[in-house]
Amino acid sequence: MASLPKKVAERLASGIKRFQPILAAAKARDVGEADTVTIIKDMLAEVFGYDKYSEVTSEFSIRGTYCDLATKIDGVLQTLIEVKAIGLDLKEQHVKQAVDYAANQGVDWVLLTNGIVWRIYHLVFAKPIDQELVVDIDFLALNPRSEHDIELLYLWCKEGWQRSVLGEYHTQKQALSRFFVGAMLQTDPVLEVIRRELRRVSPDVRIDIEQIKTVLLNEVIKRDVFEGDKADDARKKIARAASKALRASNNRSENKEQADGATTPLGA
């Protein structure tokens, strides 16, 4: 993650201290959705650094219906925010509506919150549209002295957004997902390494890559890891990365050959 500016870190720590008692009191009073929205708007400004007059929009209209809030930076829609009353437990159906709104606008990110729980989702533009939970924060559980907790909040604050830290965090999380690891285990280079190590243990046994792959898929990896849209997407991304690396390697070889040819004396 990009280094966190000191002033931003101090603002985030101060924001935790200020809003934890406010949220706890609001939950004890079981305030409704409208009052929760008021608290969220203050948090967007005082904790996350957005200008609540120019960068936070209320009741964002989408095809005749509304999302509670939206954030904009330099006039560009960034995230749609679905707010629920502070005492309401957040459920899957709550984010579905916001995801539909975001898909209609071509927005990649959705935030679902009741003030205490903040869940940031990344849209997956497949058929049907899906969402992936990237960040899940319990604001009341945050420690203002914890570097990890401050960095979690930085992911979604204005300065973090401008430095693309949320996108980088999402990419890293994807690379370590079970779908990516499962897809990587099925690639020929990894299977070849496993085959070599198995032959070292059992030198007299004939083992080929397909046998290893069959064991992995049938006995080692859970079925949901290598089946479905997320597994397919992981395989495609790994294949594209491998193809890109191969092209880059070929280009370097060609450039080296051309450079060597240019420096070879005539008649050599």
Image: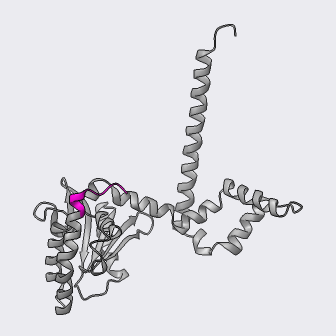
Question: Would residue 46 appear left or right of 236 to someone viewing this image?
Answer: left
Tell me where residue 155 appears, x and y as whole percent. 32, 63
Question: Would residue 37 appear left or right of 183 to someone viewing this image?
Answer: left
Instruction: Say which residue appears at 58% left-offset and 16% top-offset.
Output: 262
Question: Would residue 52 appear left or right of 98 to someone viewing this image?
Answer: left
Q: Is residue 14 visible?
A: yes
Q: Is residue 110 above or below residue 171?
A: below
Instruction: Say which residue appears at 56% left-offset and 33% top-offset.
Output: 251
Instruction: Say which residue appears at 84% left-offset and 64% top-offset.
Output: 202
User: Would residue 214 be counted in the magenta stretch?
Assistant: no
Tell me where residue 53 appears, x and y as whole percent. 10, 63
Q: Is residue 54 above or below residue 43?
A: above
Q: Is residue 263 above or below residue 95?
A: above
Tell me where residue 147 appears, x and y as whole percent. 33, 67
- Location of residue 183 (image quadrant): bottom right
The answer to which of 71 and 167 lies nearer the viewer is 167
Q: Is residue 67 visible?
A: no
Q: Is residue 8 above or below residue 254?
A: below
> Which region is colored magenta?
1-9
The answer to which of 54 and 228 lies nearer the viewer is 54
Query: From this viewpoint, which residue is outermost toward the bottom?
Result: 29
Instruction: Say which residue appears at 28% left-offset and 69% top-offset.
Output: 101
- Location of residue 106 (image quadrant): bottom left
Tell me the quadrant of the picture where the N terminus can be found. Answer: bottom left
Question: Would residue 198 appear left or right of 18 to someone viewing this image?
Answer: right
